[in-house]
Image (tube, grey):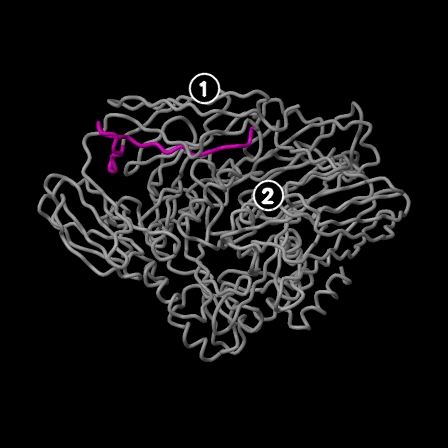
């Protein structure tokens, strides 16, 4: 690794400011390595299982020995009464909302839980390197195998890679994994879930193999002009065998069409029970560049051979791109100036909590792209590797954020893990080492960040290090002096002063706005915890969405925005407390249904198509006739005409920051806005008064699902009138029946004040909308899922979703 960093330092000293990417942890096809998804068939117990009291010499003596764990950690513990389930699993989202629980965690009790799984290993696995991987456990965990403690994890967002080779049993002998999870341990002030909430793997490798996260292939542009690139690839090998070996490592670069671009190889001596790294150089001329609009990806193949025999092989996705931050003009992607249009988000969703299927994460990212988002801040913790793979493919830049601000050895290890795992993703443009720390304006905070920055640079010199500061910018000692890019959380009044006093420091918003909205509500009623969706409500530390963007858009030295937040999330129900149970901050609600802020930012951020949207909906009580209703148009047109029941009501020049509003005397019927550019109509949008709801409507996010037991999707639930128009103020309770090769895994409706269960088979509409999430079962034959929705007084709806045969079936 020293050799690798030496190459990077030489390049950096030549002023080649080139910041590239890669994806070391893609879902790879590996010869010589077997990745087994270990999610099925776990037994679970909610609540602690006390260890037996240790009494007497013999008991005390044996308790101190390897393989002799007692209680529920013992291999022979009787767990037949425990629940059988599949991972990922968040037990907190299953629990009722409880006023006695912590509001920051969504008023859901967390507690302690135990997991157990038994499995056998073929005798042919002897001599292989065996590794258990837990991608995420909330929060603290102790892990045993066959009665021995193998690992303790102290962060709910870091992965655990556990070498079980020395502890494994083979043939007919049974291996027992036990995990005790302490979810009372709290790291955040938001909903964190509880349990083994990300995927778990058993990885079988040859004795000589590439370690997990062991490929670093970082393309570097060789000249400021032209398009010639060098990849100084670094591969870390481990040898769990009994003798030292000489390994041949081959690397090759392939384009999306499967054409070989370059290949090279090198030899390395790997001692027994040790690891070592080898450097291999690849070159590429005129590669297609990764960008937010064209996320071009390549692949690197790594092969390991010993005595001519292949022992390991993996494919790694990669992309070519440069990034640069300028203190005067902001951010550049591939040497083209680009304003960062980002959002901050936590990682939970309605109905599933933090145990979010990858396909639901993809749904959320697609909604953000539709909104005009080009960047995502992982607040305030590393995401799943699958999430980063999606950002690579979809073209969304990422601020990857460390959870715990601490420069002691354990917390530096957590930071090192994040950088090592994620440093190859083309989507990642920033490392953030903390969020809003009280020590940010002190000498101690400065020294801590100086050390954390140093640790990041040991592993990756290609991206700036930032910190999300909300104060201390003008203190004699402050963190801005120890980072590469200064992150501002709010503090908009300090943008100009800071830039004037620190003209050589690059800066960005790392968090802004904190606006409040209730989807579909257009009158504020704090007694009912309802906040209007006209962008008039925001936290005392924040701004409106409109003001926040204007402050950034008009300052070229501010690289961009990261709006708090893209989606609502469980917990942190600011500005309220009980009975509100989720946030009001999102541009979308917790289901992903857009609020006014979604369309507002879409109008501000989308440049390649015409945008126009009107709020509110046009269903108002009879006693509202003749009374003024505030109407807001969200558009990127040059001018807008507003028509009421076919008659021109008003015309305005469009305001790209404030948008356009009118006071319109309510009359039932049709309200229409038309957008114009250079006098030509480019867009129109209509809201109209609907009739009484008569029928349920189910709209799937996609046309089909994969029968792999993993694929899931949201279904939008509405009621419509006799003319098929969605009724926006409907609040009906809907009951669901599902048959076929799938199951209902979650329900939601975006109401931050709702206490309805998020599991089960019924959910009320909230302002016309609800969401049902279905997931397939693993199936080797094609099938279908049938959903029937019923409500009192409504015509039922039936939806049949084709399910394709699972790709893993033989």
Q: Is the magenta stretch mostly helix, strand or loop?
A: loop
Residue 387, image x and y in percent?
55, 45
Which residue does the image show at 78% across and 25% down from the upper left? Answer: 173
Pick whichever, 139 or 362, lies toward us: 362
Which residue does the image show at 65% across and 41% down from the upper left? Answer: 142
Instruction: Tell me the magenta residue range.
Output: 709-731
50 shown above or below 427: above
Residue 151 seen anywhere in this rendered image of the structure:
no
Front label number (1 vs 2)? 1
The residue tagged 2 is 136
Please give left or right for residue 632 compared with residue 112 in the image.
left
Residue 599 seen anywhere in this rendered image of the structure:
yes
155 shown above or below 118: below
Pick whichever, 320 or 125, lies toward us: 320
SS label for mark 1: strand
Whether residue 762 is in magenta: the answer is no
Mark 1–mark 2 distance (CA, rounded to whole Å): 31 Å
SS label for mark 2: loop
Please give left or right for residue 457 compared with residue 720 in the image.
right
Number of numbered callouts drawn: 2
Which residue does the image show at 45% across and 76% down from the upper left? Answer: 499
Q: In which quadrant will I find the C terminus? A: top right
The residue tagged 1 is 739
Mark closest to the chain's N terminus, 1 or 2: 2
Q: Quadrant of residue 680?
A: bottom left
């Amino acid at each position: 690794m020293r050799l690798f960093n030496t190459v990077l330092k030489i390049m950096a000293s030549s002023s080649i400011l080139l910041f590239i990417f890669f994806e070391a942890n893609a879902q790879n096809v590996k010869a010589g390595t077997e990745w087994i998804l270990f999610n099925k068939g776990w037994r679970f117990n909610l609540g602690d299982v006390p260890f037996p009291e240790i009494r007497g010499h013999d008991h005390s003596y044996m308790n101190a020995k390897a393989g002799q764990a007692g209680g529920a950690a013992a291999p022979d513990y009787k767990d037949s009464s425990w629940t059988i389930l599949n991972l990922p699993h968040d037990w907190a989202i299953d629990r009722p909302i409880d006023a006695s629980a912590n509001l920051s965690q969504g008023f859901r009790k967390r507690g302690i839980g135990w997991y157990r799984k038994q499995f056998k290993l073929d005798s042919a696995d002897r001599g292989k390197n065996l590794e258990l991987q837990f991608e995420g456990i909330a929060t603290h965990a102790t892990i045993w195998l066959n009665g021995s403690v193998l690992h303790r994890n102290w962060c709910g967002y870091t992965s655990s890679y556990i070498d079980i080779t020395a502890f494994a049993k083979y043939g007919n002998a049974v291996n027992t994994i036990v995990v005790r999870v302490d979810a009372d341990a709290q790291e955040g002030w938001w909903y964190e879930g509880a349990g083994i909430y990300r995927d778990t793997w058993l990885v079988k490798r040859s004795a000589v193999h590439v370690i997990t996260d062991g490929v670093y292939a970082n393309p570097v542009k060789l000249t400021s002009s032209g398009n010639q690139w060098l990849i100084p690839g670094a591969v870390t090998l481990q040898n769990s065998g009994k003798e030292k070996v000489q390994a041949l490592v081959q690397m090759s670069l392939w384009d999306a069409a499967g054409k070989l671009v370059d290949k090279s190889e090198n030899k390395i001596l790997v001692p027994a029970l040790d690891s070592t790294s080898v450097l291999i150089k690849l070159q590429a001329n005129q590669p297609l560049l990764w960008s937010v609009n064209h996320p071009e990806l390549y692949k690197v193949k790594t092969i390991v051979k010993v005595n001519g025999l292949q022992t390991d092989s993996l494919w790694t996705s990669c992309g070519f791109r440069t990034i640069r931050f300028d203190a005067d003009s902001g951010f550049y992607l591939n040497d083209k100036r680009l304003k960062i249009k980002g959002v901050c988000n936590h990682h939970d969703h309605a109905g599933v909590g933090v145990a979010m299927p990858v396909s639901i994460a993809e749904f959320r990212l697609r909604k953000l792209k539709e909104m005009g988002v080009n960047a995502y801040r992982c607040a305030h913790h590393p995401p799943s590797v699958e999430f980063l793979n999606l950002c690579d493919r979809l073209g969304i830049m990422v601020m990857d954020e460390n959870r715990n601000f601490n420069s002691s050895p354990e917390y530096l290890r957590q930071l090192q893990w994040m950088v090592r795992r994620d440093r190859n993703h083309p989507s990642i443009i920033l490392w953030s080492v903390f969020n809003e720390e009280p020590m940010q304006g002190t000498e101690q905070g400065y020294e801590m960040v100086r050390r954390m920055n140093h640790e990041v640079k040991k592993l990756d010199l290609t991206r700036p290090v930032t910190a999300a500061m909300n104060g201390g910018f003008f203190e004699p000692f402050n963190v801005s002096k120890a980072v590469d890019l200064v992150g501002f959380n709010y503090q908009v009044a300090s943008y100009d002063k800071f830039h004037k006093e620190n003209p050589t420091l690059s800066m960005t918003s790392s968090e802004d706005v904190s606006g409040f909205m209730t989807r579909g509500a257009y009158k504020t009623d704090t007694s009912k915890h309802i906040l209007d969706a006209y962008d008039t409500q925001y936290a005392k530390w924040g701004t409106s969405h409109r003001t926040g963007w204007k402050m950034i858009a008009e300052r070229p030295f501010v690289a961009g925005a990261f709006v708090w937040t893209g989606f609502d999330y469980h917990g942190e129900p600011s500005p309220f407390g009980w009975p509100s149970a989720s946030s009001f901050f999102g541009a979308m609600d917790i289901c992903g249904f857009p609020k006014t802020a979604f369309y507002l930012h879409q109008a501000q951020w989308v440049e390649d198509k015409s945008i126009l949207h009107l709020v509110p909906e046009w269903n108002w009580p009879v006693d509202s006739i003749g009374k003024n209703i505030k109407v807001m148009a969200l558009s990127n047109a040059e001018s807008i005409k507003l028509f009421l029941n076919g008659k021109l009501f008003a015309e305005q020049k469009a305001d790209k920051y404030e948008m356009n509003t009118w006071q319109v005397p309510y009359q039932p019927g049709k309200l229409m806005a038309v957008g114009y550019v250079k006098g030509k109509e480019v867009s129109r949008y209509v809201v109209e008064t609907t009739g009484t709801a008569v029928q349920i409507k189910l709209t799937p996010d996609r046309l089909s699902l994969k029968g792999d037991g993993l694929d899931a999707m949201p279904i939008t639930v509405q009621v419509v009138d006799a003319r098929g128009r969605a009724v926006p103020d409907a609040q009906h309770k809907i009951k669901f029946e599902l048959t076929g090769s799938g199951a209902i895994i979650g329900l939601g409706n975006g109401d931050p004040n709702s206490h309805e269960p998020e599991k089960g088979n019924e959910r009320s509409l909230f302002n016309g909308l609800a969401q049902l999430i279905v997931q397939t079962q693993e199936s080797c034959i094609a099938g279908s899922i049938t959903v029937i929705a019923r409500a009192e007084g409504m015509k039922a709806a039936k939806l049949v979703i084709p399910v394709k045969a699972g790709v893993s079936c033989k």
